[in-house]
């Protein structure tokens, strides 16, 4: 069948619609059937994403919002999530921007290896990342005694939350920033140099502004990933209220302790944040192409 | 006077050439891919030669024997790139002002010099236009103004007419020729247009498979 999805002729239970009938359909009907099949497939997947998220809103009781947000646990989780995600974003921007730049521009031995290592946290399960962090920086980990001697205990602290988020989320920024730098026309940088700007000023006045939409998009994605971080955080930082209990952990704890309404309210807050992020990224992408 | 004596390995053949460029326009002709653009990039310092010497007036810009390499932003050698390489996130005035900003020229003098260039190239009304909205001929004038406003010690033009359509090219060619005749620094005019030498009679180079020969 060249155009349109053929009905299943092998299935004898559908004699009502046979090959003759299918072939008799005119050229307008066949594309219509095909289009319906495509729309149906698309609709199923979209519904599969929308229905669970929407049901969170259906189960949301307006009066629960007030009571949930009045609990210190929820307030602390909200504050902790906002503070830690912005700190990990700042660290990622500071360390990840030079890394993204040299991964795109410099050639050095082992570059491919560094490139692969940077991407690892994207594919490593977050729980494994948390265990790895624990074994490296935990009290009995490789570097634990070193920090212990300095009077610093990293695991099960707010610092551990930031470390877990940075570990898991930074690759999203580095990848996006790198693609942004790669898309900058090198001739424009050469033009800037010949007009008298040194390498640093050329980076600041030409490279960064031209890569800005990609950098912002990557930063937003990185922040969103940090906000949703759960597995590595609970392994390495624990689930201590006010110290390491971020929003996703608070959702989990409230669900476990039978406090469903609070879990729902916190989930809705997380979804609204994510929605904002998706809108930001899409607007930035639209501006880049348009 | 600009003097060069260079050797640089290209993908398929080495670029080898030496010559002297007096003040005024010197045409560099030859088929595309012969290494004409490479000569400009070497002189501007965008690429480093394996061996070679470049001197401009009394300054040594590149001297591999002595280990001298002046970075491009300290050479004061301006390039007009083939597609003009205007900064798309800056308006016309900011593009022209860019080299003055690099030299930390005070704001008032900068504005005055940009205004002078805008007037000279008849673009006063376009000062705050986005460069992406300009016609080919206008873009070329912005690029030329941006290169000349810094009063470069040498000027390099890479096929300045190639990005224009045929009708515009005819008009712009004579305008450009008139402008360039007033420029009294060593100027290399790269073109694969055989008419370029009629426009600028005088010294010329021919580049073929990376080998530079001085004509006349």
Image (cartoon, rainbow, N blue to C red):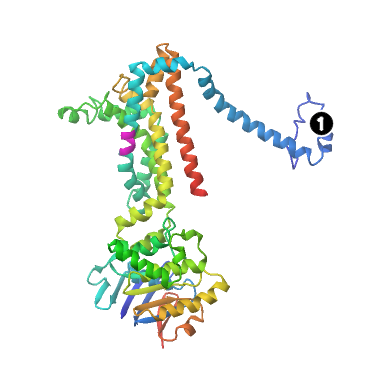
The answer to whether one can see residue B9 in this image is no
Identity of the residue drawn at 32% across and 26% down: A80
Identity of the residue drawn at 35% across and 50% down: A101
Comparing A79 with A10, the one in front is: A79
Residue B30 drawn in magenta: no
Comparing B36 with B110, the one in front is: B110
Comparing A139 with B146, the one in front is: B146
Residue B185: percent from left, percent from top: 34, 78
The answer to whether one can see residue A141 in this image is yes
Instruction: Check disc 1 and report its element: helix, strand or loop.
Output: loop
Q: Is the residue B10 above or below the residue A284 in the image?
A: below
Q: Quadrant of the N terminus of chain A?
A: top right
Around disc 1, counting alpha carbons within 10 Å, would you say few (fewer than 14), some (14 to 19), or many (20 or more)?
A: some
Q: Is the residue A225 above or below the residue B20 in the image?
A: above
Magenta highlight range = A86-90
Comparing B210 with B120, the one in front is: B120
Pointer 1 residue = A18
Q: Is residue A256 left or right of residue A131?
A: right
Residue B48: percent from left, percent from top: 32, 67
Q: Is the residue B1 above or below the residue A110 in the image?
A: below
């Amino acid at each position: 069948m060249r155009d349109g999805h053929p009905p299943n002729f092998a299935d004898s239970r559908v004699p009502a619609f046979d090959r003759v009938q299918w072939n008799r359909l005119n050229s307008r009907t066949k594309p219509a059937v095909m289009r319906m099949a495509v729309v149906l497939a698309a609709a199923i997947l979209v519904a599969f994403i929308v229905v669970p998220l929407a049901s969170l809103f259906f189960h949301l009781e307006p009066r629960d919002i007030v009571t949930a947000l009045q609990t210190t646990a929820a307030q602390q989780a909200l504050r902790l999530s906002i503070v830690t995600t912005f700190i990990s974003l700042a660290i990622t921007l500071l360390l990840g921007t030079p890394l993204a730049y040299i991964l795109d521009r410099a050639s050095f031995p082992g570059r491919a290896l560094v490139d692969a290592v940077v991407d690892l946290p994207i594919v490593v399960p977050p729980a494994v990342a948390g265990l790895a962090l624990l074994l490296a920086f935990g009290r009995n980990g490789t570097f634990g005694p070193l920090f212990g001697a300095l009077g610093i205990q990293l695991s099960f602290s707010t610092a551990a939350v930031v470390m877990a988020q940075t570990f898991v989320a930074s690759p999203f920024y580095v990848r996006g920033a790198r693609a942004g730098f790669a898309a900058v026309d090198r001739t424009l940088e050469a033009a800037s140099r010949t007009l008298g700007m040194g390498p640093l000023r050329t980076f600041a006045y030409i490279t960064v502004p031209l890569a800005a939409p990609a950098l912002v998009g990557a930063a937003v994605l990185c922040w969103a990933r940090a906000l949703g971080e759960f597995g590595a955080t609970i392994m390495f930082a624990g689930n201590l209220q006010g110290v390491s209990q971020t929003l996703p952990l608070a959702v989990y704890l409230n669900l476990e302790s039978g406090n469903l309404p609070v879990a729902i309210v916190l989930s809705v807050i997380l979804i609204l944040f994510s929605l904002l992020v998706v809108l930001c990224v899409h607007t930035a992408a639209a501006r880049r192409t348009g | 006077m600009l003097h060069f004596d260079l050797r640089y390995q290209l993908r398929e053949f080495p670029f080898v050439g030496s010559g002297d460029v007096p003040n005024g326009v010197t045409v560099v002709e030859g088929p595309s891919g012969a290494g004409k653009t490479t000569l400009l990039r070497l002189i501007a310092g965008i690429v480093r030669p394996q061996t070679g010497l470049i001197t401009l007036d009394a300054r040594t810009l590149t001297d591999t024997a002595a280990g001298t390499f002046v970075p491009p932003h300290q050479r004061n050698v301006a390039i007009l790139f083939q597609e003009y390489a205007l900064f798309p996130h800056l308006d016309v005035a900011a593009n022209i002002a860019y080299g003055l900003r690099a030299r930390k020229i005070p704001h008032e003098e900068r504005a005055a010099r940009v205004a002078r260039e805008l007037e000279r190239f008849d673009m006063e009304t376009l000062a705050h236009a986005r460069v992406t909205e300009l016609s080919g001929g206008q873009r070329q004038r912005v690029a030329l103004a941006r290169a000349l406003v810094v009063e470069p010690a040498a000027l390099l033009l890479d096929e300045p007419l190639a990005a224009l359509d045929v009708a515009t090219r005819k008009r712009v060619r004579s305008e450009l020729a008139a402008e360039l005749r007033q420029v009294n620094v060593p100027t290399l005019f790269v073109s694969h247009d055989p008419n370029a030498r009629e426009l600028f009679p005088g010294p010329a180079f021919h580049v073929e498979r990376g080998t530079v020969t001085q004509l006349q």
